Image (cartoon, helix red, strand yellow):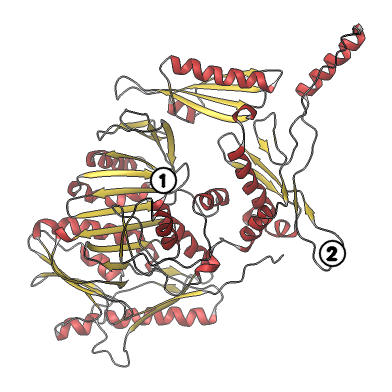
Amino acid sequence: MPEQQKSTSYTYTQQFSGVSFTQIAPSQKVYLFSSKSASGSASIKIAAAEVTAFREAFSGLLGVIEPGFGFRDTLNPANTFELNPNNTERAKEREGLHRHIKVHNKKKDNKVWLSLDPIVTLTDEGILFEVVDKRGLQLAAYMLKKSGYTGNVESGSGHIEAGLDLVQSLGSLSGRSDLEIFIGSDFDLDTETAQKYTVEHAENLDFIEKSFPVPRAWQRMSLQLQASSMLDATDFSMAPIDLYNIVRALHLKAGDKKMRILLVDQQQPRISIEPWDWSLVTTGEAFSGKTQQIELIEYAAISRFQNVTPFVSSISLRITGEAQPAFWTLKSEHFTLVLGMSNFRPTNWTKGLMLNKSLPRNAEAAQDLGSAVSIDDTNRTAVTHGIQNGAYSINVDGQSFARSFLGEADFASLVYRSGQERIAYELVDNNRVAVQSTVEPNGRRVLMTALPQKFVLKESKDKELKAEEVIALKIALQKQINDRPKRAYSKVTESQRNFQFSEPVFQPRLAILSNGATRLPECACTYYRKYGDKKTCAHVQALYIQYLHDVDRADEGSVELTSRMLVRLPSTAKESELVHAIRLQNKRVIEEWGSFFELNNQTCRRQVLAFNQISEARTCFFGRIADLEKEGFVNAG
């Protein structure tokens, strides 16, 4: 079985006739140069009252990709790839920067690449701008509705040139006069402006060419993040002032932070930022749905849009799951702004596999659903597949628009993140993974050991046991209670190759904590010995994939490792909530209670109950949950 997946590399190549810029005098204008391969054009005017809203929204959109406008060679820090705008010949300087990148990539193995330019989609419903950051962990979409402008729009799509010139000059726009926006490949400019921003008067320069390789991992992650906008999600709304207060708290409190969102049916959502025990009860609509608590890992990026809050009428947050993509949506009468975040790092391979389960990919080509699609249950699957293949935009206000995200990229090779992941899925599909698991005394479920055999007290009705036999049975029972179960390793079997005498059998190991986090991956294969846990081997991944399948089919009556959190909300916003965290760990029931702040800092009260049998611990666990619910606590998952 091959260790690597062969695929065709994708090179981002776009040609522009100028550098996008903003003009302040004699009138406010924004010129956005589209690529030579783009279609459509626009010449619109935004009323003075809406110019400030456009400035803040568009600046926030470009802020997502701004960190990727430059690159510094880590092997040679003196070799920088950053834009140093020249006041007289910015187009020529921009071409020199990208020519320098192409020369470097031909000579060096460490390939330089920058943020991809924004994609603009010109439609009858409005103008949509989309960007994805260089990490592939954040995206932003800005839909300027047709009610927010006047003018002519010719339908089409393509990339528009973006750089520090545009970002720095947008701040000069004001609401004192109307704003004209031009989108196209060529504009009628005066000689001085054309000489500065276009290639029209430059010698030996026909166009600005941006060309650099795009990593395959980024391609797949960015497409999965876009397609996540189609997943079923838990959503709730808040008032603009709530977002302002959240962003203000993030600015005032430095350091590592966690955002916990407590959603209780028919109650106002409660947002807490740890570790300072800062809480906010939102002032929007009451939440309707399943009571739960969700933690957001990557959320600070919403601060980029803090200046937009005065111009929006509603704000909503869609969360697809714990440590899964989340989408902030800011709506106004004339625009919709969406910020998507993956909510997990690329190194967290377990969350990546969980996202694969929600968004399976295949190598089939995307269907032609038209230029604009209103999303419903009949076409949701087809639109999701179209987004995964870069043919359609993300879900904005229940609509998706046709456009090309990565051009001629090899989408068939993006079914898996890596060759090891492909091998892992093939092992599971071919039934070559045998999972054995149990819950250790320390509360870890280890995917390598067998479930403990049930102890049966063999008594004969016809014969009374002697005293010494009863003592021996009691000793055996106590030994089974205290001792760890007998080891029986999980097995992953590969197909036999021509030079092998038998099928290779591996015994990978993986520990899973009560909160779902994984620890201690281990395998004896050559790949793991070489890379360790930096690049998880196919056998450990196959073990976890099979575990996810088994969990879906598991009976609640056989659960051995799980946790619940029950919360009683305070009567006033200034008081802290009372939280009971209950964990079932094999033959133990662990209960901790206090505020979220006390639980996070381990200053809460704690009680541990130990039982002789797992069934007894399970009965106590579910009984304690029922008792707390009778006392007014709500189950937050």
Amino acid carrying mark 2 in the image: Gln
Task: Please state the horizontal and vertical placement of residue 164, each as a whole percent of the image.
Answer: 30, 68
Task: Please state the horizontal and vertical placement of residue 199, each as a whole percent of the image.
Answer: 27, 86
Quickly name the residue at label 2.
500
Q: Is residue 244 above or below residue 42?
A: above
Q: Quadrant of residue 46?
A: bottom left
Helix, strand, or loop for circle 1?
loop
Helix, strand, or loop for circle 2?
loop
Nearest to viewer (mark 2 / mark 1): 1
Q: Quadrant of residue 395?
A: bottom left
Q: Which of the two residues, 396 or 16, is positioned nearer the viewer here?
A: 396
Question: On the rendered structure, is 106 left or right of 164?
Answer: right
Q: Which residue is at a point 22% across and 50% down the rendered structure image?
A: 307
Task: Please state the horizontal and vertical placement of residue 213, each as a whole percent of the image.
Answer: 48, 74
Q: Residue furthest front?
A: 378
Q: Which residue is at a point 65% across and 56% down the rendered structure image?
A: 424
Question: On the rendered structure, is 2 left or right of 163?
Answer: right
Q: Is residue 90 above or below residue 461?
A: below
Say whether residue 537 is visible: no
Task: Please state the horizontal and vertical placement of residue 6, each as a whole percent of the image.
Answer: 61, 71
Q: Earlier in the sequence, mark 2 or mark 1?
A: 1
Quickly name the residue at label 1.
232
Q: Which residue is at a point 18% across and 49% down the rendered structure image?
A: 311
Question: On the rendered structure, is 372 left or right of 434?
Answer: left
Question: On the rendered structure, is 193 left or right of 235?
Answer: left
Q: Which of the two residues, 402 or 69, is positioned nearer the viewer here?
A: 402
Q: Which of the two residues, 357 or 383, is positioned nearer the viewer here?
A: 383
Counting other residues with Cα less than 10 Å from the Cα at mark 1, is it few (<14), some (14-19), or many (20 or more)? Answer: few
Amino acid carrying mark 1 in the image: Asp
Q: Which of the two residues, 12 or 122, is positioned nearer the viewer here?
A: 122
